[in-house]
Amino acid sequence: MKPSDQYFLPTYEEARRAFRKRSTDVAAVWPEASLTQYAVGKPENNNTTDIIAADAKYHSNTLIVVTTGVHGIEGYAGSALLQLFIDEYLTQLNPNTTGIRLVHAVNPWGMKNRRRVSENNVDLNRNFIKDWSSVPASLNERFEKEKKHFVPEGPVKSWKKQRRDLLGALGAKVFKRGVYGLEKAATMGQYQYPTGIFYGGAAYEEPVEKLLSRMDEWVKEYEAVVHIDIHTGLGPAEQLWLQVPHSDPRKEKELQKQFGHPEVNDVQKTDVMEIKGEDAEYVKDVYSRRHPDKYIFSCLLEFGTIGNRLPDQMRALDIVVHENQYYWYGAKKEADARELQKEFHQLFDPPEESWKQAVLKKGKAGFDLVLEKEAGMRLVKK
Ligand SMILES: [Zn+2]
């Protein structure tokens, strides 16, 4: 048995079962703690988002919310970190003044089927739109220009050849327009092609609607809300990036100073011009406006898998584009089908023990930092 096995479970069902069992540990600290769940999709498919909830016993000072699996396949690391949170922090939080909401698999279908998106192909982290009337379908013009490359139709005939064509076509443009232009055009989200990559939908997806209707209520009860959303995929392997949404009033430099830690490799502020519909931005901005008397903090912990240099980004784009094509149209060659799935898993849920160990170690550092700096916790160093 590898050291990470107790945290990283191989299937959605096993991860969910392990998480549900942990509600008894939470009840040891907060006797009123509850485990609830809601179905996403048809109830008979048994895809659920599970929530362990516990409220402050005496004074509703701070609520800590941890969300996982907004991008389904990233929920395996998310599930591991929820268990780590229960192991490491329950006894350090003050149940008299602190409440918690641990949210397992916001996108359970995606977690079960190892896809980033929802059953309707919606990227949920492009779906937390504050005002849908400000997001016309034609929002992402650059994506539209590259439609042929980003949303290829028909089965994958030869991945190797298609990769060459994609990288050749994009490479020439990268050379002309600068390194990150195209990668950003792809990843900022698009609202036009329902079978394409990074599709943000046309209205709130069921998992987003159901989560937000609950969060709306949770936020009302507390003076401060600290929200942490767990992701994987961006950034160099075995590194942790802390991403703070655009509407946080602090400058990136200040945040980098405040969250400086040897295990946190970078602190970034998300550029709202580039990415629409992110959950952290929604939480920070919408709840701060709705409740100006409350302190709201929201961030992403992003655990890198393959790198952020140009060749890594091109590779990631190649995998995401063709995995999506394979999902919709299949592949002519069995070997391509296998390879695409393997590479997709490598990109969001790598099997290596060293990666899992890094997630646990750096995840603890990320929790430590956010709880100390934003939730005012005095943690006992173990
Ligand atoms: Zn993600």
Image (tube, grey):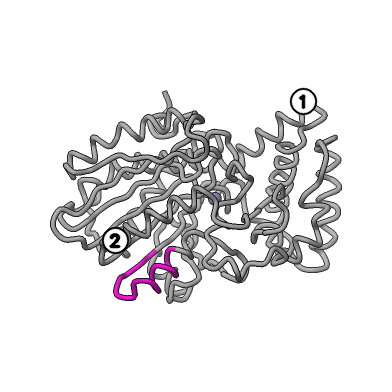
Closer to the eye: label 1 or 2: 1
Residue 215 quadrant: bottom left
Relative to 223, is 190 on the left or the right? Answer: right
Instruction: Estimate the x, y position of residue 49 in percent, counting from the top left.
Output: 43, 41
Amino acid carrying mark 1 in the image: Glu
The residue nearer to you, when weighing 286 against 326, is 286
Relative image position of residue 100 (x, y in whole percent): 28, 51
Residue 140 image-quadrant placement = bottom right
Residue designated by label 1: 334
**Marks 1 and 2, the one that precedes in the sequence:** 1
Q: Nearer the viewer, residue 281 or 305?
A: 281
Q: Amino acid at mark 2?
A: Glu
Q: Which residue does the image show at 31% across and 57% down from the upper left?
A: 218
Residue under pointer 2: 372
| Magenta highlight range | 283-297
In this rendering, the answer to whether 273 lies above or below 34 is below
For the N terminus, the image quarter is top left
Task: Say if mark 1 contacts mark 2, CB within 8 Å.
Answer: no
Q: Secondary structure at mark 1?
A: helix
Q: Is residue 84 magenta?
A: no
- Frontmost residue, 378 versus 48: 48
- Give the percent coordinates (x, y) of residue 369: 34, 59
Residue positioned 78% across, 61% down in the render? 144
In the rendered image, the residue lying farthest to the top is: 1
From what the image shows, is residue 93 above or below residue 340? below
